[in-house]
Image (cartoon, helix red, strand yellow):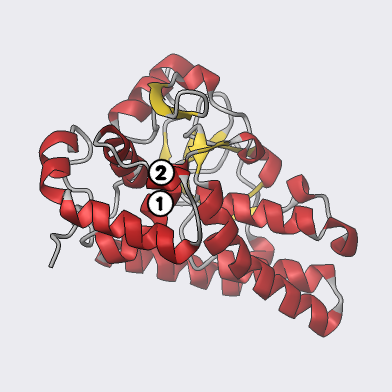
Amino acid sequence: MKKLIILLSLIVLSFTLFAKDTPFCGSSTAKGDNCYLLLKDIYPTQANIGEYQVKVRNLPKYQEIGDKAFDKTHSAADVQKAIEKEQAKKIFPVIKAPDGNFYLVDRHHNTRAIYEYYLTNERELHTDPLGVRVLMTVEKDYSDSATMQDFWEKMEQKNYFWPYEFDQKTKEYIGYDYASLPTNIVSLGNDPYRSAMGLAQKEAFEDPSSDDIFFFQFKWGKCAEQLGFIDPLKFDNTEEVVRRSVDFLTNNGDEMKAKCIGKGYENMPIPKKSS
């Protein structure tokens, strides 16, 4: 957690003092650097997001901030500054690849929400949603990998890739190959279990013991589906989703821990025991 606080402080400081001088991510970008990527140039490392979570939690935050800035000055530039200031409060980690691209390994939901905000307000802001820039931090530089296959093998070994997709037809998880990943944040599919885990996270999970655990909400969502949790498919309202999800996680936490923690997830947040 200390590492996270330090990195977060550096990002906020970087944004407030040096945003004008921050470069776009490129060939000279190194591990630990902050740099901008356009939304169209951000490559996902997962097949799905929780669309419901984006709708009820992530998007409203940016909508409120953007609307407030626009109402004050009617300036798209001021809206951009306000959105970027909020976005810079979180670390958006990317991995540099040998193909010259940068692959996002966390904050897919926030990134999608930024896109959807600009898409919804495209007429007023006169801004191409895919041309919006987002501040990134280079988590790792794997551009020295001999091939892209070597790169993806390393990504999976280091838990920087979620190799499953929620199948909308069967309502089950299926294995997913990196070659089939969407090439932009817009094309991500929907995983209702990821929404449920994200919305219930603060109430249902213990704090993580490591800062470098990605995709654990997907991991618990897949486990919950396998153990018979079907409530995410029946969204009534957010409070009900959270209540049902928290109840399932806390009542089945021991079984989930016994069956679902695997390599790369040993230190991920675990469900709290029911009181």
- On screen, residue 45 versus residue 83, left or right, reads left
- On screen, residue 12 versus residue 186, left or right, reads left
Near mark 1 (Cα within 10 A), the count class, few <14, some 14-19 or many ≥20, is many
Near mark 2 (Cα within 10 A), the count class, few <14, some 14-19 or many ≥20, is many
Residue 243 percent location from the top left of the image? 34, 62
Residue where numbered disc 2 is placed:
193
Q: Is residue 77 above or below residue 154?
A: below
User: Toward the viewer: 60 or 33?
Assistant: 60
Q: Quadrant of the C terminus?
A: bottom left
Residue lying at 62% horizontally and 29% vertically, measured from the top left:
183
User: Toward the viewer: 113 or 20?
Assistant: 113
User: Toward the viewer: 250 or 205?
Assistant: 250
The amino acid sitting under disc 1 is: Ala
Residue lying at 77% horizontally and 50% vertically, measured from the top left:
129
Residue lying at 35% horizontally and 47% vertically, measured from the top left:
217
Q: Quadrant of residue 163?
A: top left
As helix, strand or loop, the secondary structure at mark 1 comes to helix
As helix, strand or loop, the secondary structure at mark 2 comes to helix
User: Toward the viewer: 189 or 240?
Assistant: 240
User: Do residues under tags 2 and 1 come within 8 Å of each other at their CB atoms?
Assistant: yes
Residue where numbered disc 1 is placed:
196
In this rendering, the count of numbered labels is 2
Q: Is residue 139 visible?
A: no
Residue lying at 24% horizontally and 59% vertically, measured from the top left:
205
Q: Is residue 149 above or below residue 258?
A: above
The amino acid sitting under disc 2 is: Tyr
Residue 172 percent location from the top left of the image? 40, 27
